[in-house]
Amino acid sequence: MMILEHGEAETALEQMRAASNGFQAPGGAGPRVQELCRALQAFDADLTRHVELEDKILFPRAVAMEKEAAGPG
């Protein structure tokens, strides 16, 4: 389920990146829009790292622990 949610989050971020030119504030944007773009860039980086850690470290360890707990079979 969490892997599916990761895919949905990544799709949403891709759409947001496309709609905002990679979270770049348009020329002449005011300080609030510029800060919003910076915050979205930071959120994107944080979420990408979060998903990467879960997919590459946490989930494989959880699967291995489940197999170990189930015993030979």
Image (spheres, grey):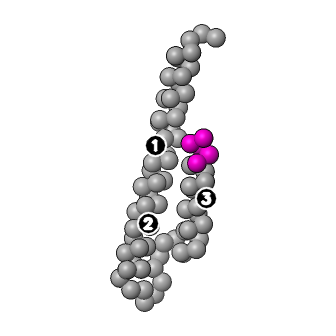
Q: Which amino acid type corresponds to the residue marked 3 in the rendered image?
A: Thr
Crowding near pointer 2: few (<14 within 10 Å), some, many (20+)? some
Give the total number of marks visible in the rendering. 3
Q: Which mark is residue 53?
A: 1
The quadrant where residue 36 appears: bottom left
The CA distance from mark 3 to mark 1 is 18 Å
Our reading of the magenta stretch's main secondary structure is: helix
Above or below for 7 versus 16: above
* Mark positioned earlier in the residue sequence (3 or 2): 3
Q: Which mark is residue 41?
A: 2
The CA distance from mark 2 to mark 1 is 18 Å
Secondary structure state at the residue bearing disc 1 = helix
Q: Nearer the viewer, residue 5 or 19?
A: 5
Above or below for 71 versus 52: above
Q: Which amino acid type corresponds to the residue marked 2 in the rendered image?
A: Gln
Crowding near pointer 3: few (<14 within 10 Å), some, many (20+)? few
The quadrant where residue 40 appears: bottom left
Furthest-front residue in this view = 1
Residue at x 48%, y 83% (from the top left corner): 26
Whether residue 8 sits left or right of residue 58 in the image: it is: right
Q: Which residues are magenta?
A: 1-5
* Mark positioned earlier in the residue sequence (2 or 1): 2
Which corner quadrant holds the N terminus?
Answer: top right
Q: Which amino acid type corresponds to the residue marked 1 in the rendered image?
A: Leu
